[in-house]
Structures are given as structure tokens and as C-alpha cells.
Amino acid sequence: MAAESKHLSEWIDADVDEVYAYARDLSNLPEWAPGLGSSVEQVDGQWFVLTSGVRVGLEFAPLNDYGVLDHDVTMPSGEVFYNPMRVTRNGEGSEVVFALRRLPGMTDEEFARDASAVAADLARLKQIVEGRRSAR
């Protein structure tokens, strides 16, 4: 059965390649997406994120020319959650789109809370990337 999705997006006044490169660098994740994790570490080529006191695996789609930032989050139980995400060209800037999937058994309040957290992370990504551009 298909899960309900909510598409969240943010327009960023920066080139798509710049946004993609910054967001794809997992060492930047705690800065722009603290909703996902407070710290990251790489062990034997595998990335891990500390989120709510739990260490989870994180793997982005392979480097590509299309701005695809889809990623899998692997829980300690081995359960994997797929998260579609893209950076696309929009005029002279970029648009980042994240498809939030409603998990089985998730209440309306939990889904709304997750949507708010993702929206805040995308807004932070915008602020950071645009701030880096203006600092040059």
C-alpha cells in the first residue's frame, strides 16, 4: 500500500550545483538538518547520524548530474526508510523538494510535526547557502 506523501520545498537563490554540493556533503548535515541528526561520523565508508540518541545509517544516492539527493535511513533494527529529495534548477536559482512519507501508524499530529521539522531544515539550508554566497 502506498504511503501518503507531503511535498515540502524551498527556493534558494543559488546555483543548483552549489546547493547540491553543500547538501550532499554529509559533514554539513548537522548544520542545516539538525532535525535529522546532531552529529555525523563515517566508519569504514559508511555514514552514521546521531538522532534522538539513536545512531542510524545514512546513505545518499550516488553522485549524479540531476540533483537527486534521495537517501536511505537505516535504523538499528535494520529497517530502512527511503526519503526522496531533489535539487532542481528554478530560474537563476534552485528549488529543493523533499517528499515526506507518512509512516504506518503515524498520527496527524506526528506527521505535521515531521513536516514542520523538514520545512525548518530546508529553510535553514536556504539561509546557510545564501549566506555563504553573500559572504564571498
Image: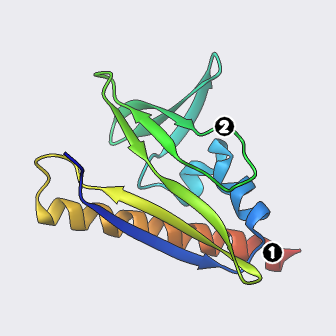
Q: Residue furthest top?
A: 44
- Residue 133, which numbered label? 1
Task: Write the residue at 65% across / 43% down.
Answer: 27
Where residue 40 sits, quadrant-wise, is: top right
Dot 2 falls on a residue whose secondary structure is loop
Disc 2 marks a residue whose amino acid type is: Pro
Task: Write the residue at 58% across / 31% down.
Answer: 41
Disc 1 marks a residue whose amino acid type is: Arg
Dot 1 falls on a residue whose secondary structure is helix
Give the camera-side residue of 111 and 65: 65
Question: Residue 78 in the image: x percent, y percent?
Answer: 33, 22
Judging by the rendered image, the residue that carries numbered circle 2 is 62
Mark 1 to mark 2: distance in Å?
A: 26 Å
Relative side of 68 to 108, left or right: right
Question: Residue 51 in the image: x percent, y percent?
Answer: 39, 41
Question: Residue 127 in the image: x percent, y percent?
Answer: 62, 75
Q: Residue furthest right?
A: 136
Characterize the local packing of mark 2: few (<14), some (14-19) or many (20 or more) Cα atoms within 10 angstroms: few
Q: Is 1 rendered above or below residue 43? A: below
Q: Earlier in the sequence, mark 1 or mark 2?
A: 2
Which quadrant is the C terminus positioned in? Answer: bottom right
Give the camera-side residue of 112 and 97: 97
Label 1 vs label 2, nearer the camera: 2
